[in-house]
Image (cartoon, rainbow, N blue to C red):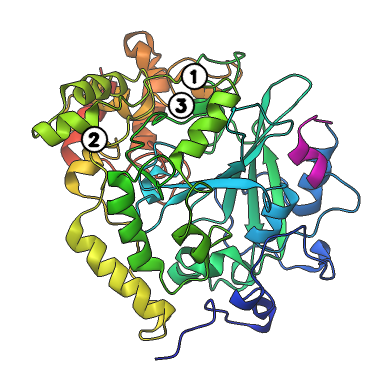
Amino acid sequence: MTRLPSLCLSSLLLSACVGEIGGGAATDEAMTDWDSLPSVSAPDPELSGLPRREAQHRALCATPRGDSFWQAVCATPRPNITDLASLLGVAKLDDDRAFALTGNSTSLVKSAVSAINPRLIVFPRVTEMREKPAEMTALGFVRGEPFVEVVSRDPSTGDYNFYLFTFERQCDYDGSCDLASLLTEEIEHGWTAFSIYSEGDVENTSFDCRSCHQPGGYGTKKILRMQELEFPWMHWFPQRFVQRTESDRVLTSQFFEAHAQDAQYGGIPIATIQNAIDEGSGAQLEALLVAEGQAAQPNAFDPRIEAEVKAGSSSPIWEKQFAVSLAGDSIPVPYPLADVTDPALRAERTRSYLDVVTGAAPRQSLLDVRDIFSADAKVKLGLVPPPGASGRAVLTQLCSRCHDGRGNPALNRTKFNVKNLDGMSREAKDKAIFRLQEPATSPLRMPPWRAANALPPAELAAAIEELSK
């Protein structure tokens, strides 16, 4: 059986294959002339109207910021970032860093995250005394889309600046980006250009950082988010720092079953993840948030939920927290069990992934490893509304993240406030009805596909009926 070398498909990608993985500063390879590159054939619909490459770089760097990430990417000459490892180097996260993987996310990328396609957070490692690091930049990444989320603290103000780092590859120009190019290690290599957007650039899109990180509303302090801030960190792995947890036993084994043939995940060598004792864990991420003064989290996942679930089939504490998110008063609460997947779907897609990365099956046969949630998890993660939910309940649960009246009053989206349906104008309601019926590929579809699945027919009809009043 011949293993494909990181699924490299062209000479452009060969320099970024598995053999050259490693941390460090931005690569010393000759810098690509961005003006010489073709246009992206299918840009993200929500970002297509924004500047790209050099124009966006000039715009970002024209407004000075005090955080270390901005200073690094706006240095002269511009850093040559060609893969995830070199991005970690620019962010000073290639040494004396920590990391944690999660098999359940309540973030922007929640519909993509499970143990076999986890979200990785890389961040500064803090001391045992939990002293606040002088500089703080953290990256969040999950395979499936060509972007990395970044947060970096301004040491002079203490404020957090959020960035969306998007990257391009050869397949973006010739239209050959397929599931294998997005969901295997291939997505972490061969970057030809990048564009970095500030939180203000993307606040009128589903990428809006502030909808989660500014829970107090427009103009208030932004926060870091980690809803499972205490032991047993039910969805974080590997977890052997304090003592091995259930999530480590369940989720780590699922992860390595799928990724044993990979060289890295999220720029971190698989061997490092496999042998992590205290470098990788939810406990380390908790330590960072405590050091940063971010231990007070809205609707934080109650650690007693694990014991309640073990003792019975449900958790009254979790149900109470879920009710808060159903009412639109918080982002979704994490799932009450460690594993969010359907076992049959997970086994099928793990086998498909391994067959493709080892060369036993053609890349075109790869099944989508993101599509593995159990029916129960889809409801409890807020990807679909509870069956039979009223139209008002559907709108409140699925739209409150961006449309609860707390956003920038200058944006058009604030005119649609699901917390004030009775006071909403007929024009705003009609526009919402139109957007609810947009095709799944449309950037106008409500709710956006990153936030939730397409509404089932009965719940869609109920939401439209409510808006028709």
Q: Amino acid at mark 1?
A: Pro
Q: CA distance from mark 1 to mark 2?
A: 23 Å
Q: Amino acid at mark 2?
A: Pro
Q: Nearer the viewer, residue 281 or 53?
A: 281
Q: Nearer the viewer, residue 166 or 140?
A: 140
Which numbered mark, 1 or 2, is in the foreground of this view? 2
**Where is mark 3, residue-wise?**
402
Q: Are there few (<14), some (14-19), or many (20+) residues within 10 Å of tag 1?
A: many
Q: CA distance from mark 3 to mark 2?
A: 24 Å
Q: Are there few (<14), some (14-19), or many (20+) residues within 10 Å of tag 2?
A: many
**Does the stretch in magenta take in 69?**
yes
Q: Disc number at residue 336?
A: 2
Q: Disc number at residue 215?
A: 1
Q: Given contact means CB atoms under 8 Å apart, are the residues at marks 1 and 2 in contact?
A: no
In percent of width and height, residue 44 lies at 56, 52
The residue positioned 69% from the left and 77% from the top of the image is 15
Q: Nearer the viewer, residue 51 or 466?
A: 51
The residue positioned 52% from the left and 71% from the top of the image is 263
* Residue at the right extreme, as displayed: 76
**Quarter holding the C terminus?**
top left
